[in-house]
Amino acid sequence: MTPDGEDERPIRANPQYALGQIARALATIGTNEDPETRQRARDKVHKWMSVLEGMLHGTLHVGSRMPIVDMPTWVTPEVMTGGFVTGQLMAGGPLRTHENQLLKRLSIEAEKDPRRLLNGYYLTDDGRAELTEMLNSQKYLVSVPEEAALLVAEWLALNGKNGDAQAVLEQISPFFAQLRFFPAPAARTPPVGGRVFLQDAGSTVASLGKVKPNRRFLAQKEAIELWAPLYAETTALFLETIEGDPPSFQHAPGTAEGRARRRRNDIVGGWPCKRYPDGWKDRASEFLVRYGRARANNKLSGKPERGKENFAKLRKYLQQCIETPGSLSPHEIGMIRVILARYVAKWGLPNSPPWVERRAAQLQQVKDPPFHQLAALVAERLARYPQDRGIEDLTRIVQPVTRAEADRSDTRLGATIPQSILRKVARCKADTAEGLVKDGLVTSGEALARVLPPIIAELRAAGIPDPSLRQVYASVYQAFRRRRSLLLLNLEHQARLDELPWVAPIEELRSHGGSGVESARQALNHVAGLGLTSFPHALLPNKLIQELQALASDARVDLPLTEELAADIFMGQFSAKYTRAAKQAANLLKGTLYQTYYGIDYQVVQQLR
């Protein structure tokens, strides 16, 4: 307690938040019909239970820069909604595919601490030779920052900086059994040149694979392509049994007079079931057999079997005509006559010019293949491209169905790709950030912040003379930017890139002057302008502020950029940079409409300590 009676204990996160998330996930499990959604909800329950148990048992300090007990700030934790950590480590957990492959290649029987053995392998002569080859070829993937640590240590050792290399190893070796400090091998070098994308081709293929069949459309397609012609065939069979003209309404059924007279059976023409041409019963029997076979394999549309539908009624009467034609009552024959008159009024006589025209228009409605088939076809096209990057030219991927594709699949030649699938494919388009904004693919400051790290990583790495180390730095930067922010209390700040033990020695080698300063300044102006002019209606998100801070640092521009504050964790006070920012704003906005509208006394602001 302070002399004023205030509690000096640090504020802690409330575990009730985790309980609320668990309750929401459990509700999803109990109510959602999609099995994949329910499975995701189960996974969330498992992870939030880890959060809750860690908070209650004291193994997790949610709200701290070091949220996992006995783990340093540079470790990348798994972070849930709201910045809560689960206790799992992004560079830890079960062995990845490339780790198991390495164990098999080395013929290592690792029943205990397999990751310690794998990390240790890269300290042997053979392992170091592999790291050197990765550095030279640049064919590796760094998904979390830790995976670059041994690469950096090897570069330092190769370049005579044994002390720095040893310092890195001393910091990371206590965690060899838990974390992966080496990268995954890659088939090709990473792309360069300022092109960015929202998601890589592999992720786009996966999203296309999630396009489910639309049952309603498939039922409509089945009804039009299969049941409609069979209904017409049933009608034609009964029209053959009429003596005289086909039955029809004397007045148009759609008019008020027609509807009124229809109730008085306003039908003219002959009556069905008066004669049966030679071979009629055999053809009718064969039709019913064909219908039964078709129905056994096509049940998406339930309409043909509904007893109140005319198609079902006609088939029942058809069976009766085949077996005992004389058993039909006058009422039943009258019902058949009404059904025939209604069909002729709506469609025309089967195979007549009006019927053919209406049938063509009906088939036009379902001429294109189902969306899930087209999504699978586009995914097949996309799978031929490198899966770990975007694609600059999507023309061949989104073209209509080709002859070869139509021949090997149940897909119509020339069918166009629908807009919903085109939107999914567009997410892997590689272009400049401005191009993605212009095309409407980047629609928010948050999305802009997600695509910028490769550009800024390349720009910041340009100050490193050695190309192999330059690529390592760029990979670490991008991986670090993918880290999710922690929930932090008591005015603590997020982990910084230069706090990573293997990044600090690189920063010392990175040039911070000359053309690099001017390039960073130009990029700062460009990125800030792009964010402000593209999304003027919204605050710049914190992730974008982080990128601007990185550019400002390299440009040697002292800007007190301030992040958006979360109201639910506001500590009731501000750090010093907020005061600096307020004073700069006062100098710029004093005497403007902004000051008048909000009633701000900038003289008081300028006198703040």
Image (tube, helix red, strand yellow):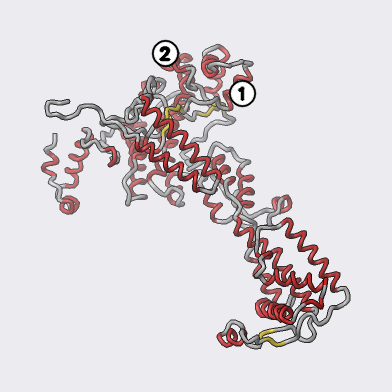
Q: Is residue 158 left or right of residue 372?
A: left
Q: Residue at x 46, y 28 (%)?
A: 90
Give the quadrant of residue 82.
top left
Q: Position of residue 249 (x, y in %)?
A: 66, 85
Q: Residue at x 78, y 86 (%)?
A: 244
Task: Point out the tag, 2 or 1, that comes first from the N-terminus.
Answer: 1
Q: Is residue 135 left or right of residue 75?
A: right
Q: Which mark is residue 170?
A: 2
Q: Is residue 77 left or right of residue 64?
A: right
At label 1, the amino acid type is Gln
At label 2, the amino acid type is Glu
Give the quadrant of residue 134.
top right
Q: Position of residue 569 (x, y in %)?
A: 28, 37
Q: Nearest the camera: 547 or 7?
A: 7
* Residue 224 showing in the rendered view: no
Q: Which mark is residue 101?
A: 1
Could you give the CA–CA distance between mark 2 and mark 1, rounded to whole angstroms?
A: 27 Å
State the quadrant of the N terminus.
top left
For label 1, count other residues whose C-alpha is less than 10 Å away and answer few (under 14), some (14-19) or many (20+): few
- Compared to 530, does 485 lie above or below? above
What count of labels does the image hold? Answer: 2
- Compared to 420, does 205 lie above or below? above
Give the quadrant of residue 457.
top left
Q: Is residue 381 left or right of residue 352?
A: left
SS of the residue under disc 1: helix
Q: Nearest the camera: 192 or 145?
A: 145
Q: Residue at x 37, y 45 (%)?
A: 445
Q: Residue at x 77, y 72 (%)?
A: 318
Q: Position of residue 449 (x, y in %)?
A: 39, 41
* Residue 562 showing in the rendered view: yes
Q: Which mark is residue 59?
A: none
